[in-house]
Amino acid sequence: MIHSKQSYRFDWRLATLLVVSWLLAGCGINDIPTYDEQVKATWGQVENQYQRRADLIPNLVETVRGYAQQERETLTAVIEARAKATSIQVDARTLDDPQKLQQFQQAQDQLSGALSRLMVVSERYPELKSNQNFLTLQSQLEGTENRIAVARRDFIAAVARYNTEIRTFPGRIWHSVLYSDMPVRESFEATTQGAEQAPQVKFR
């Protein structure tokens, strides 16, 4: 009989724990860390696409150089802009630093501008424009710019979802009680006007 009572008491406590856990999960207690992880994951995709662009640039510069060595100033500007862009890293630990995020985006915008000027230069060299290697790199770069735009759009959406959650009920309560160390996050919209759109790198 004693064993039965102890078993009953244990079952009752387990049931209570399960019900409480279900209620807490249902009222959004896990939403804030979930949305925070989504922000970090989407930022990772932004970084991946910018790195993809950076990886294409050395071959692009060398191809253009082969046909337009006299365009040294433009080529140098691209190389320097790439070096600066790749030197500024924003990872999960520094994603909450608005100044760091702004520096990162400014460096990427400068690289976009330098690439745009390089493409204008290519218009002066018909042989370069018909070179198969150049055409392949051009296509890859165009595709990468589109991927960057999509990745940034997804990041902006993830940040907006996270910020909305910690500013509205009931997320605001959970934030103040359990997640007060998780700040409002910055996005591209908060640092660079028009950053949700792909940089204008014109090839034709």
Image: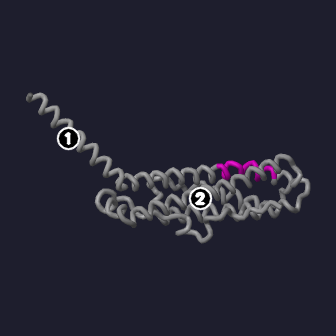
Please tell me whether residue 28 belongs to the stretch shown in magenta: no
Counting from the top left corner in percent of width and height, residue 110 is at 65, 64
**Residue 73 visible at all:** no
Please tell me how crowded label 1 is: few (under 14), some (14-19), or many (20+) other residues with Cα within 10 Å.
Answer: few
Q: Secondary structure at mark 2?
A: helix
**Callout 2 amino acid:** Arg
The image position of residue 123, as x and y in percent, is 86, 61
Residue 150 quadrant: bottom right
- Residue found farthest to the right: 126
- In terms of secondary structure, where does tag 1 sit? helix
Please state which amino acid type lies under the numbered disc 1: Arg
Residue 152's mark? 2
Residue wearing tag 1: 13
Residue segment shown in magenta: 52-63
Front-lying residue, 82 or 120: 120
Q: Identify the disc placed on residue 54.
A: none
Residue 104: image location, x then y, percent: 56, 61
At horizontal 74% and vertical 55% (from top left) the residue drawn is 142
